Image (spheres, rainbow, N blue to C red):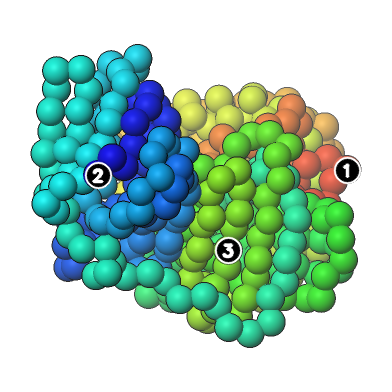
Amino acid sequence: MLLFKGPRDQLLSPLQSVCGIVEKRHTLPILSNVLMEKDGDQLTLLATDIEIQIRTAAVTGGSDKAALTVAARKLQDILRSLPETAEISLNYEDRRLQLKAGKSRFNLQTLPAEDFPRMAGADGAKTKINITQKQFKRLLALVQYAMAQQDIRYYLNGLLVVVQDNEMRVIATDGHRLAYAAETLPDSHQRQEVILPRKTVLELSRQLADNDDPLEIVLAPTQVQFRFGNIEFVSKLIDGKFPDYERVIPQNHTKIIKLSRDGLLHSLQRVAILTNEKFRGVRLVLGAGSLKIISNNAEQEEAQEEIEVEYSAEALDIGFNVTYLLDVLNNLNCETIECHLADSNSSALFMLPGQQNFKYVVMPMRI
């Protein structure tokens, strides 16, 4: 039975869209497979890891009906290894999938489609949000680096999305720093908060295009659905209480300096070379007209950079983990950044000048 006939990329492109979530080693062997369903001239591809499910489709010849599952990574690797100009065909006979391209032949084992686990649809009230792919991709990029990794407080291993009126906010924190970004929506919505899992955030960042094509987000109590292009992306949500982010963001820091993002980034990168490898601490010493960045390590080595700044208030000496500062500077696309400080025991607030839609808070460290 002919499942597909056409150019290599006509199948490889949708397959790559779903393969990103397929785990290499899984307790359920079938979860390493992709579900292929042929109905008329459409071939639907679906992959899941139980927490996330991605579905997309390829247009193909023929009018047969069939359903099977096949090893996702193997099929992807075979297609990638073929020439870009290759014409391929997929045939399904006797529970085996045969891929032909020129004089190449590959026979792959399949598992029954009826054994493939699908995620059930969400119950409860649903909220539909329209935004562009570029807007949501940018929101994720502004905060995702601040998510925790494998924290025992499982709700920190994800990203909080808050929708209220005509605004969407995204917040991530690992307990040492917090990133916040906001975007205006075309429609007004009732307040809703959900926590997206880390893997969902990273996969969306990879898949979303940097353009103004539409993205539809459907929020439900236990599930979220993203529709963009010909992709349907469904994810379970993290059930937990996210920290009160508004209390964490400082309000009245009086020491404010404006810095070149590039200048600060390069100074920190150089100073970071001589930091203690475990703690990665740097000192920011703020004085009249200058900001000194200092690091040292257990070998008694020291680095110092000095940046001219417009500042005339009292001196300040405060320590930070340099990785947290580099993370934010690497993920911003701006010329100038504003740093708000209070004293050596208070967190620092980084913002974009004249804007309230991005905030980054870093806790100080003792050096």
Query: Is disc 1 placed on a helix, strand or loop?
Result: loop
Q: Foreground mark, 3 or 2?
A: 2
Horizontal relation, residue 278 to residue 322: left or right: left
Residue indicated by mark 3: 225
Residue indicated by mark 1: 354
Residue indicated by mark 2: 1
Tag 1 near tag 3, CB within 8 Å: no
Q: Taking the image as drawn, is residue 16 in sight? A: no
Amino acid type shown at disc 1 = Gly
Residue sitting nearer the eye, 119 or 175: 119
Query: Is disc 2 placed on a helix, strand or loop?
Result: loop
Horizontal relation, residue 260 to residue 227: left or right: right
Q: Considering only vertical position in the picture, is 296 above or below 314?
A: above
Q: Foreground mark, 1 or 3?
A: 3
Q: Residues within 10 Å of mark 3 (few under 14, many from 20)?
A: many
**Residue 232: x and y, percent?**
53, 55
Residue at far front of view: 63
Residue at (12, 28) in percent of width and height: 105
**Residue 185: x and y, percent?**
82, 56
Query: Is disc 3 placed on a helix, strand or loop?
Result: strand
